[in-house]
Amino acid sequence: MEAIWFGSSSQGCTSALAMDGAGWHASGALLAPDTLALPTLSPNLPELNPAKTNWQFLRQNKLAHRLYDTYEAIVEARCEAWKSFATAPDLIQSITARQWANVS
């Protein structure tokens, strides 16, 4: 699940929670109130999913072209990559911002 948007729409929704199309997000058992829209992002359009661009950045800039001796070293490298990324809000904003998504 990616983002929450609050507002109104022609369908009368007051909020929406965009989901990335994972199998567990498509369960028929999921019940949502009428005031919540649950749109699913297309798996073929990763540019719509900011989490995908975050992972792409981390793979290309922090995790690529490295050899690890142990599984623990892999986990440690991923943790360090996420820590450095999570403490850089300007970087996150620059990676996930979409020109077409600005409201002004």
Image (tube, rainbow, N blue to C red):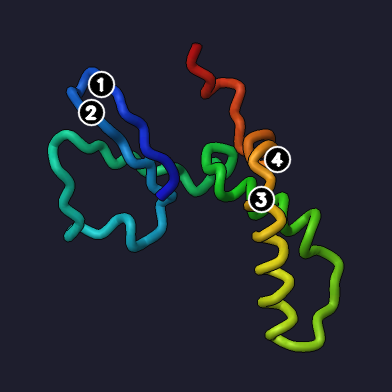
CA–CA distance between discs 3 and 1?
33 Å
Point out which mark residue 35 bears. none
Q: Nearer the viewer, mark 3 or mark 2?
A: 3
Q: Secondary structure at mark 2?
A: loop
Q: Picture quarter containing residue 12? A: top left
Q: Nearer the viewer, mark 4 or mark 3?
A: 3
CA–CA distance between discs 4 and 2?
30 Å
Q: Secondary structure at mark 4?
A: helix
Rendered residue at 78%/59% (across/down): 62
Q: Which residue is mark 3?
A: 87
Q: Secondary structure at mark 1?
A: loop
Residue count near mark 4 (Cα–Cα under 10 Å), binned few <14, some 14–19, many ≥20: few
Point out which mark residue 91 bears. 4
CA–CA distance between discs 4 and 1?
30 Å
**CB within 8 Å, label 4 to label 3:** no
Residue 83 location in percent, x, y?
66, 60
Q: Earlier in the sequence, mark 3 or mark 1?
A: 1
**CB within 8 Å, label 1 to label 2:** yes
Rendered residue at 16%/52% (across/down): 31
Q: Earlier in the sequence, mark 4 or mark 1?
A: 1
Q: Which residue is mark 2?
A: 14
Q: Earlier in the sequence, mark 1 or mark 2?
A: 1
Point out which mark residue 8 bears. 1
Q: Is residue 24 left or right of residue 62?
A: left
CA–CA distance between discs 1 and 2?
5 Å
Measured along the vertical axis of the image, is residue 52 above or below residue 16?
below
Q: Give the amino acid type for the residue marked by disc 4 in the picture.
A: Leu
Residue 66 location in percent, x, y?
85, 71
